[in-house]
Amino acid sequence: MTEVEGVEVPTEHYIDGHRVASADTFEVRSPIDWADWKLADVARGGAAEVDAAVAAARRAFPAWAALGPGGRHAALSRLADAIDAAVPRLAAVECVDNGSIHEAMEQRVLPRAANNVRFFADYAAERLAEPPRTLHGGERNRVRHDPAGVVAVSTPWNAPFMLATWRVGPALAAGNTVVLKPPEWAPLTCSLLGDLADEAGLPPGVLNVVHGTGAEAGAPLTGHPGVDRVAFTGSPATAHVVYRDAAAQLTPVSFELGGKSPFIVFEDADLDAAVRTAAYQFDNSGQVCLAGTRLLVQRSILDEFLERLRAAADEIAVGDPREAGTTYGPLIHPVALGRVTGHVARAREQGARLVFGGESLGGLYYAPTLFTDIPADAEILQREVFGPVLTLQAFADEAEAVALANGTDYGLAATIYTGDAARADRVSGAVVAGTVWVNCFYVRDLETPFGGARDSGIGREGGHHSFDFYCDVKTVCERTALYAGEGGTP
Ligand code: NAD
């Protein structure tokens, strides 16, 4: 246990309802003041702890599954309420653990975490069952969503608590038990999730948390033969390893991965709105998978767009994420800073023109950065930087906009600003993306499918799609005439 911003945070694993230490620990530091601010020494789990957690989850599974969606609803509603009540504590810890803006955590991101649990608990209880269909021969066809078993969840650090609940919520609501591996660069709020599960009265073993590095704890978990589903959020590079390990058991995977998403602005767009949203792509120091980091702007409005974007970027205040008025805080880790500075250096070497930024502001803080006049084959147009670095390209017409938009290996999201509904529809259809925003950004309905195409992911979650993944979906075809009595409804 350690104290962070006045909050008691467990530093051990949470296995079978108990806090469990490991022989070794890893150090967690705050990106706000990396050199001088150590937050915790956290238990460094490995294959043994993963085995124990998977075994606990396996033992807890039959009783949790047997409760049915209605039976689980009360416990998961209590968990959602507990998260809601803990938002101030979670926000205080998350802000110093991963450098996210405190106000955004408290007001938007962490309340979404409670909603992730509540929405899927409600959905399972009220809407999962589909009406049976009667076949011509008189047989009744029913579709059942039965829980799959033990779900392994591995998530990244850029919104650790919210992203964990986005997977844990539907997995538990479907009747599975879960082993969560928090991100080692920001593990503290996920550690608190164990306490909240306890507080909500989840039976021991239903939710387990094993800390550790990706190689030492993540790999044994996602490749574990006792795991029935792997839900992984992270980079495509890691996903290749996870996919290979899961494939050894033919374990189904749901991958939500990185992006290099286009942000397309047509000359008929509301330019104020487009520029405001374009500047927002620097949010969270650019460490947002969905960020529209490739600005594609119609040539006729390019100069005006650039001038206005520069003015908007001048307003960005980079600094301590705990302070009101800060737009974005630090990068997460010195490795992330190294990656960003490397990308910027190579972009310059490869002939891209730096419009603004391109410099470290001390510590892990990095200036909002924009490149333009970029050679078509430059790395900066192809690879995810995951930092506050945008590129700007001009296009002549719709066809060129679509060609540029689809010119990477990714396909997570696309944003379109236009005043023309028919064009919005055409371009939405033509771009490769899991989510398309038109004249808006980042808003999401938990009911709708979410995921990525190409290297940005495998599968879709959200609403019914989540249950299709976390359940064994089965068809029961029954000749009800042979049942005793009425052959009643199950
Ligand atoms: P990463 O792939 O390096 O790590 C993600 C998590 O995976 C970490 O917790 C790590 O410990 C764990 N991990 C590493 N090896 C593992 C293994 N073999 N098995 C299981 N887990 C393992 O990613 P990152 O740099 O921490 O996160 C940033 C990436 O995540 C970016 O590419 C970003 O776009 C992506 N992301 C995607 C979404 C989405 O919803 N599509 C959301 C957030 C972040």
Image (tube, rainbow, N blue to C red):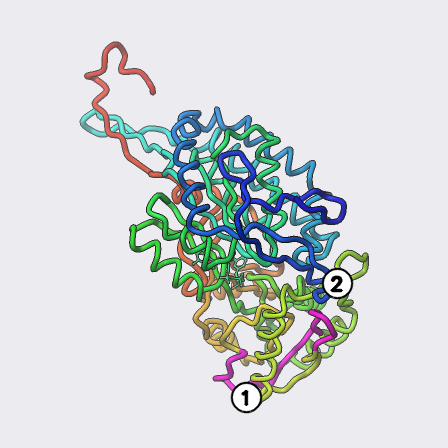
Earlier sequence position, callout 2 versus callout 1: 2
Report the residue at 70% width, 42% height from top: 8
The secondary structure making up most of the magenta span is loop
Vertical order, 140 against 298 (above or below): above
**Image position, residue 343 (x, y; %):** 57, 78
Which quarter of the figure is the C terminus placed in?
top left
Dot 2 crowding, Cα within 10 Å, few <14, some 14–19, many 20+? many
**In which quadrant of the rendered view does residue 277 lie?**
bottom right
Along the line of sight, which residue is nearer the eye, 39 or 477?
39
**Image position, residue 35 (x, y; %):** 71, 67
Magenta residues (range): 360-380
Tell me the number on the disc at residue 327. Answer: 2
Along the line of sight, which residue is nearer the eye, 304 or 354?
354
Q: Quick check: is 11 in the magenta stretch?
A: no
Report the residue at 67% width, 55% height from top: 97
Q: Quick check: is 363 in the magenta stretch?
A: yes
**What kind of residue is marked 2?**
Thr
Vertical order, 170 against 298 (above or below): above
**What kind of residue is marked 1?**
Gln
Tell me the number on the disc at residue 88. Answer: none
**Image position, residue 10 (x, y; %):** 63, 43
Along the line of sight, which residue is nearer the eye, 456 or 405?
456
In this rendering, position of residue 455 left or right of residue 160: left
**In which quadrant of the rendered view does residue 359 lie?**
bottom right
Tell me the number on the disc at residue 350. Answer: 1
Which quarter of the figure is the N terminus placed in?
top right
Dot 1 crowding, Cα within 10 Å, few <14, some 14–19, many 20+? some
Vertical order, 326 against 119 (above or below): below
Disc 1 element: loop
Q: Do residues under tags 2 and 1 come within 8 Å of each other at their CB atoms?
A: no
Along the line of sight, which residue is nearer the eye, 350 or 446?
350
